[in-house]
Image: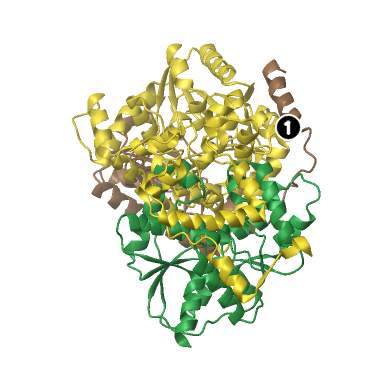
Chain colours: A yellow, B brown, C green
Amino acid sequence: MSKSSQPIDDFARELSRETRDAVLSSVVTRTAGRKAKLEADYKDPDLLRRLAGKVKQHTVEHLDEYLEQAEAALTKNGAKVHFASTAESARETILEILRNKGATRMVKSKSMVTEEIHLNDFLEKQGVECVETDLGEFIIQIDGDTPSHIVQPIIHKNRRQVAESFEKHGLGAYNDDPQTITHRARKHLREKYLQSDAGMTGANFVSAESGRIVIVTNEGNARFGMAANGLHIALVGIEKVVPRDKDLGLFLNLLGRSATAQQLTVYTQFINGPRSKSQPSGPKEMHVVFLDNGRSKVLASKERDILRCIRCGACLNVCPVYRQTSGHGYRAVYGGPVGAVLSPLLAGDDFPKYADLPKASSLCGACHEVCPVNIPIPELLLRLRSRANKEGIKSAGAPPMAPFARMATSPKLWQTAMTASRAMNHLPITMMPIQPLQAWLKIRTLPKWRGGEFRKWMKERGGVNSGGRNE
Amino acid sequence: MSEARDTVMRAVRQALSDLQEKTPLPEYDSEILICAKYREGEVGGWLEFGENFAAVSGRPLTEVGELLVFLKEEGNDSGYCDPSLKERVGTVLEESGLKVHYEYEHDKVDDYTFGITRASGVIAESGTVVLNDEDTVDRLAALAPWVHVAVIENEPIFETIPEAIENLGDSSNVIWVTGPSKTADIEGILIEGVHGPGVQICLKLD
Amino acid sequence: MLMATCLSDVFFADMAKATVEVLESVGCEVIFPEDQTCCGQPAFNSGDFPAAEKVSRYTADVFAGDLPVIVPSGSCAAMHFHGTQLLFEDKQDTGEVESLAGRTWELFDFLVNGLGVKKWEGELNKRIALHHSCHTRGTDTGAAMETLLGSISGIELVKVGTPEQCCGFGGTFSVTFPHLSGEIGQVKLESVLEQSPDLLVSADMSCLMHMGGLAEKQNMDIETRHAVQVLRDVSLASQ
């Protein structure tokens, strides 16, 4: 088959059927689970989605105030607060914190934002061992791979591939039983935790009111990272702030259900500072690094609604394009609908590099329908398409629309063209060198061309007038 | 304040400076967050908690005897117990031949097959055990062993998640535990006991 | 007033005729402004907002007045009432566009919720798989279509799996991303065929054209009909 000019289309074409099927069946199951859970638990789940969207939109639009509040509350709780405007500055800040404590062995719990700043590579080069502890992320790390889903990072792998990796990395003879794999990882990572001298996390939410940082995991890995060593560093996107503790209830109820069809994720931590005086285990020192890295630019744009995102992954699960590509098709840390909006925006001056992503959507709107914070993703995609169009970015793959507009505003031209289209019935159209037509016909048939037929019929019935234009 | 802070804050303020209309903070009653299932079939209290805890693979128990039977059946012979629970729990287990340690030694983390610690409350609506730093004798004791037993005596039973949030208090660290540690990372298959306990027990003593 | 849509102009004359006949049978007088062309969605979806604006203003002009405008396509109707909100957000002189948005009805929404037609007389012994087109998400079209088709005796409406899945058409998406589009459609088609329906029915011809075209190319046996054609056929058969 010939390639199209679109990288994501080519990626999907070349993706193995095995991987595609693994991704598809997993996310279809997740989508059904999410829906069933929300509908069983709430009479009107949409009410909560809309409310949560408003709360987060409000927060984003008052981000300066809430960030300052959060900073003050965190400081009062005994945490040290840092800011980083770029990925580089965040990496340096984290390195400095580690160096000050002489820390060289770090355990990490799953965090998209650390992926975003490529923290592991950097720290490893500086002599800090970084061990991913989320099972999926651990497998990604030993494979030298990247996550293909926000919540289920190895959605593109099957158990046989995982078993092979484990064997290759000295984690036991080949065994593809998920239980065995998990227990081997438990044993291996247990040692890493106990030897570590720092724990790195992201954050799901930060309450501006109390400075509480909320981190959720199902595996308990973030908790272990904060029980086995004395230094906690949380890297937090500036958009993670929410106004009040009360709002944590709203977001937690939506996050668990949207991400994994759970009422609550198993381990939900509310961290109010370093460990208590009576507590023998856990961080004596806590650092929070607030990261901008392009977010303030997003905030200045009309696409700022995307900053509401709470990274539940529901839009990936439901997206017909994601279902054919996995996150890897999106060539950036964030895949799926949220990635198609966020990646071009976070890229800053490299916008043209990702301007094709917003085009790679049928605008079906399934993402908007499931979003726990009601982000109008199709609208944001359209805004980005318009921006690409204005900036004349060719890679965005839009066919020229000026001829269409000319025809669609000239009734005579339009009717002539419609009637003339009937000639297509008698032409060898499979041989006509019109690219879109050929792309269509390769895998589909077209109905019979009937241009003008309805107009003629209608005219004979006498129901035709010239509309408002002549009234 | 640092230069980095100023850069970020300036960029954020700049980004918002042209925004004319801002979304107001919606007021809402947290009542709407409560699970409809809970509201309809509400029995409340320990019974409700027990049902919901069991639904997330937790084991609610009300007798030390039940705990003893479970631990023995599962082949646990040596574990840790919060010394303040020695009298009511630890000695009962010891009398039946289990080895119980009252001092948590960090270099023996993997030797304890069970860990008995105090919980700070439970949430009925979600089947959640609440642990805070002040009541938990050692974070590791509630996390590293295969079996974790959270004990409540007169600690509160919060009916709902909003109520539990209102009562987070001023603990430096609160963790809600809703079932055993688990993953579905490999082919979506559910496996319990990843880094934390494979078995979560909540024991209520009168 | 009827906005027949550009696809009816080119391919689906019978669907447009059925729309007229169904509307007349429930007492409407149908006017077809001859100068009508297209809702402007192709340009809008391509990100060419200036081109879309031209077409959209032109169409608002053609359908000026105070009569309801009925569209036998959820997608084109949504362009009028949703798409224009974004397209004209910072624009002046949007009176006619807003007027059209306020008067536009998707056909089934109009029949059931506008006119109050809740029951359709006739009989058809067929298993029907309903495809809810993406652009009718969050609108009353889906329920309206189910109400009317479900009221016809003999019709069995079957539930299709993965209801959230798009048919893969997406306008120019189908030719710019041909592989994705085809595979997305295939997933949908397989969910439909699993139910072995006699008919695949939707309120959007574009989805049906895509799924029908994919199916025919693979010699799969599935007949597609716009929901309004079903209504018309049932009425004809009972006369």
Give A387 or B126, whichever is nearer the viewer: A387
User: What residue is shown with label 1?
Assistant: A64
Asked whether residue B170 appears in the rendered view, the answer is: no
- Residue under the image location 67 percent in, 27 percent down: A75
* Residue A199, above or below A101: below
Q: Is residue B74 visible?
A: yes
Report whether A458 appears left or right of B119. Answer: right
- Pinpoint the chain carrying mark 1: A
The amino acid on which the numbered mark 1 sits, given as a three-letter code, is Asp
**Which of the 4 quarters of the picture holds residue C136?**
bottom right
Report whether C136 appears left or right of C68.
left
- Seen from the viewer's position, the closer of residues A21 and B198 is A21
Residue A36, relative to residue A292: is it above or below?
A: below
Indicate the position of residue A43 as horizontal and vertical percent values.
Answer: 56, 64
At label 1, counting other C-alpha atoms closer than 10 Å, the crowd grade (few under 14, some 14-19, many 20 or more) is many
Give the residue drawn at x 43%, y 38%. Answer: A149
Residue farthest left in this picture: A173
Residue sitting at 34 percent across and 37 percent down?
A15
Describe the element under mark 1 as helix, strand or loop: helix
Q: Is residue A131 left or right of residue A100?
A: left
Q: As drawn, is C236 to the left or to the right of C193?
A: right
Q: Position of residue A137 (x, y in %)?
A: 39, 31
